[in-house]
Image: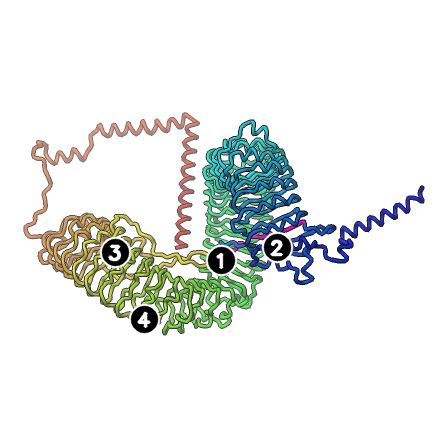
Amino acid sequence: MENRKYPRLAQFLVTLFLLFLETSFGLTSREVNKTLCLEKERDALLDFKRSLIDFYDHFSTWGDELEDKQECCKWKGIECDRRTGHVTVLDLHNEVFCSGNACVAPRLTGKLSPSLLELQHLNYLDLSVNDFESSEIPRFIGSLKRLEYLNLSDCSFSGVIPIQFQNLTSLKTLDLGDNNLIVKDLRWLSHLSSLEFLSLSGSNFLVNNWFQEITKVPSLEELDLSLCGLYKLVPSQADLANSSFISLSVLHLCCNEFSTSSEYSWLFNFSTSITSLDLSFNQLNGQIDDRFASLMYLEHLNLADDMKIKGGVPSSFGNLTRLRHLDMSNTQTNQWLPELFLRLSGSRKSLEVLGLNDNSLFGSIVNVTTFSSLKKLYLQKNVLNGFFMERPGQVSTLEYLDLSDNQMRGPLPDLALFPSLRELHLGSNQFQGKIPQGIGKLSQLRILDVSSNGLDGLPESMGKLSNLESFDASYNVLKGTITESHLLNLSSLVYLDLSFNSLALKTSFDWLPPFQLQVISLPSCNLGPSFPKWLQNQNNYTVLDISLASISDTLPSWFSGLPPDLKILNLSNNQISGRVSELIVNTDYYMVIDLSSNNFSGPFPLVPTNVQIFYLHKNQFLGLISSICQSYSATTSLDLSRNRFSGELPDCWMNMSNLAVLNLAYNNFSGKVPPSLGSLTSLEAVYIRQNSFSGMLPSFSQCQRLQILDLGGNNLTGSIPAWIGTDLLDLRILSLRFNRFYGSIPSIVCQLQSLQILDLSANGLSGEIPHCFNNFTLLYQDDSSGEPMEFQVQGFYGRNSRYYSYIGDLLIQWKNQESEYKNPLLYLKNIDLSSNELVGGIPKEIAEMRGLQSLNLSRNDLNGSVIEGIGQMKMLESLDLSRNKLSGMIPLGLANLTFLSVLDLSNNHLSGRIPSSTQLQSFDRSSYSDNAQLCGPPLQECPGYAPPRPHIDHDSNTNPQEHDDDEEFPSLEFYISMVLGFFVTFWGILGCLIVNRSWRNAYFTFLTDMMSWLDMTSRVWFARLKIKLRRA
C-alpha cells in the first residue's frame, strides 16, 4: 500500500507545479506563442480610445502600430485575466489637483463608445473625474453583467439613471455622485442584492419613495445622498418595518434641507449598525436630539455648519462611548467649554478628533489631557476668555491644537505635557509671559503660531525643535536678543515671522544658519547697523521683509544675486544706500518690491513685468522715467513720490492697464500730463501734486473708478472740465489747489455725492459759487462718517495671496495751517475755495452741509451777509471768510457752533455787536479785525451798550437778601430727615447682611464676580487697543 502512495504523490506535485506556473507566470500555450490580449477586445479598446479626446496623454501606452504596444494587458489602466486573457479592469480615473484657490484635473473628454460591450468579462470600471459633456449615462453599461465595481462620479453626466442598471446584479460598488443626474425612479435598486456601496450625491431627487426603494437593498453598508435636496422625510411605521437595512454602517446626508429632528428621526431605527453619520450643511435648528445617544456604535458624527443649533452638546452624548470623531464647527454653539468637555466624558478614551471652531464657546481650557486618545482639537474662532490650564503629570496625545482667534489670557501651560504635537496654533489671543521652556521637548512640532498675543520672551530651548518648519511670533511684545542658540538646530525651518516686536537678532559675522528659509519676515527687528551677512547663505526665499530693521549700510554687492523665485522684497524704512538697477531684474516672479524710505540713488530701474506693487518713494532717485515704456507691466500700485525725478512723463501708461494707484508727488516732472493716463480704467487714486506740470488737463473720463484726484501745486491751466462731474461719480477727494485754472466752478461737480474734500484754492476761478453744494451727500450728514483713504491692492505674502492697503496722504489747508494728513478721510470733510476771484453772495445752501468740518472762502470778492442759517453746521471746526466784502451783522447762530476752534472774519464790512457767547468771545481780536463797524468783546465795547440787569420780583414783600439766605441755608427739618434716612438705609442693608448668611454670601459673590468681570473687560479692551496701535 505504501509503494502505491509515492507515484500518486509525485503526480500530485507535478500537477500542482504546473498550475503554479500557469497562474503565476501565465505560461499557457497562448502566452508562450503570442500576446495575452484578445484581438477582439483590443480593437474594442482602440474604438473606445478614438471616441475620446486626450489632452494629457492618458493613452500614450495604447496602440497597435508598434509590436510593443499590441499587448493591451500592459496598457495604462488595463488589467487582464492571466489565464484567459479577457480584460477585467478598465481604470481611467483622474485626481483633482488644487493649488491656492484653483483646482484642475487632467480629464478625458468626449462620449463613451458602445465598443465597451465587447468587454463582457469586465468586472471593474472606473471612469471617474472625466468630462463626458453632459451626455446621458449610456444604457449599454447595464449589459456589462459581470461588473462588481462601477465608478462614474464627477463625469459631467446628466439625465436619468438607465433602468438597465437593474441587470448589474453582481455590483457591489456603484458611485454616480457629483454629476447632474435626475432621480425619478429607483425601482432598479431592489435588483442589486449584492450592493454594498451606493453614492448618488449631487443628484436631483424627484422621487418621493426613495427611502422605501433604497431600504430594499439588504447588503448596503455605505450610502451617500449628499446634496440631493432631501427634506421632510417622515416614513411610516410600515416602511420602517419593511426596511431591509441590516448592514448600513456609513450614512452621508450632508448639504440637504433637513431642519428638524423629526425629518431625519428614521435613522435612529438603525441604532445597532450606524458607525458614521454626516448631517453637516443642513438647516438644523433647535437643540440636538438626545436620540443620537441611542446610536451606541457611532464613531463619526458630523453636524458642522448647521447654523441654528442651540443648547450645545447635550448631556446624553456621555453615552457615546465609541465616538472617535465629532465635528460641530460653525454651529453657533454657545456653551461653557468645561461643561461641554464634561458632557463628552463617556468618550474620553475613544475621541480622536473634536471640531468646535467658529462658535461662541466661552470659559477656560482645563485638563484637555484627560481625553487620552485625542489627536486633533479645533477651537479657533470662539470667545474663549479664560486660561489654558493643565494638570501636571498627565501627558496628552494631541497632535494638532488650534486655539487661535479667541480671548485666552494668562501664561501658557507647560507645553511638555503635549509631546506629540505637530501643529500648535495660538495666534490672536491675549496670552502673556514667556513661551515655556518645555517647548523644546516637542520634538515632532512642525508648525508653531503664537502671533498677535502679549508674549514677551523666547526660550533658548526653541533651538531644539529640529522638525519645526514654520514659526510665527509676529505682533507680540517680545524683547531681548535672539542669538545663535535660539536657532541652533532648526534645520527644517522654512517660514520665520518675528515681525513687529522689539527683538534684536545678533549673530557672529560668519554665522551660517542651519536652515534654508522660504519666508523671512523680520520687520521692526533690529538687524543693523550692518546689512545681515547671513542672508548671503539663504538661496530659496520667496519673501524677504527686513523693513524697519535699523540698517544703515550700503547695499552689499553679493545681495544682487537674489533667489530666482523671489516674490516679495521689502527693504523699506531703513537707511540703506547704493544703486538698485542691478538688484531689480526683470523676472516672472516678483509681485511686491518696496524700497521706500531709504537713501537709494541712481536712475530709475526697470519695472519688472509681473510686479504688482512697486514702491520707490522717499529716496534719492533722479533723472527720467522713460524706461517705464520698455515693457508691459502688471503693476497695480506705483509710488515714486519724494524723489528727484525730472523731465516729461512718457505717454505709454496704457502698458500698465491694471494700475490702481499712481503717486508721483514731490518730484520735478514737467510738461503736459500724458493723455494715456486717462485710459487706465482701473485707476482709483492719482497723486501728482507739487511738480511742474503745465497745459490743459487731459480727459480722465474713462477712469470711472477714480476716488482721489490730487493735482495740486502745478501749473495746469484751463477751465475745470465737466467730465469730473459726469464721469467720476465715485470721486471722494478733488484737489486742484495752486494751479492756474480759470472760469467758473461748473455746477455739474455737484453730482459728486461721495465728495468729502473739495480744494480749488489759489487758482483764477471767477463767477458765483454754485447753489447746489448741498448735493454732496457725505457733507450733508451731520456725523463723523467717512471711509479710510486706503485702497486694497492684491499681492502676495507668505503662503497665500493677500490684499495690501495703500494709504496715501493729502496736502490741505486745515485750521489756518498747511499740513499733510495721512489717511484723512477718517475725519476730514473740507471745502476750500480761497484765493480765487469768486463774486456774489454765499449760497444759503451751504448751511445745509451739517457734516462739514472746515470751510474756507477767504480772499475772494464775495459780498452779502455771513452764511444764513450757519447755526445748522454743528460739526464745523474751522471757518475762514476773511478778505471779502461781506456786510451786515454776525448771525446769532454762529454762537451755537460748539466745535468751532478757528474763526477768521477779518477784513470785511461787518457791523453791529459780536453775539455774546463763551465760544465767540474766546477768539483773538484778529479774528474780527478790519471790520470798521464791528464792536463788542473781544473788540471795543459798542457805544451806549448797557449790560442787562438781574431780574428782581417786585411783587414779593420779602427782602431779597433774606430770600437768598433762605435758599442758601436749608431748614433744620432737612438735616434731621437726611440723618434719619442715612441711618435707616445704611443699617437696614448692613443689618440684613449681618443677620442673613445666604444674603451675605450672595452679596460678596456678586461683588467678586463684578470685579473679575471689570478686570477681564479692561484687560481685553486694552489688549485689543495695543494690537490695533501696533498694526496702525
Up the image or down, 138 lies above or below 536; here it is above
Disc 4 packing (10 Å; few <14; some 14–19; many ≥20): many
Q: In this rendering, is residue 263 above or below 678?
A: above
> Depth-wise, is mark 3 or mark 4 nearer the camera?
4
Q: Which residue is mark 4?
A: 669
Residue 1016: percent from the left, percent from the top? 42, 42
- The spot of residue 958 in percent (x, y) is 10, 32
> x, y percentage for residue 318?
56, 33
Circle number at residue 830: 3
**Taking 717 as reference, is 163 left or right?**
right
Q: Residue furthest left?
A: 944
Task: Please tell me how crowded label 2 is: few (under 14), some (14-19), or many (20+) other residues with Cα within 10 Å.
Answer: some
Which type of secondary structure does the marked residue at label 1 adopt? loop
Q: Which mark is residue 47?
A: 2
Tag of residue 597: none
Quarter of the rendering occupied by the N terminus? top right
What is the span of residues highlighted in magenta in the rendered image? Answer: 88-99
Which residue lies under the disc numbered 1? 798
Which residue reaches farthest top? 995
Whichever of labels 2 and 4 marks the residue nearer the N terminus, that label is 2
Identify which amino acid the numbered label 2 is placed on.
Asp
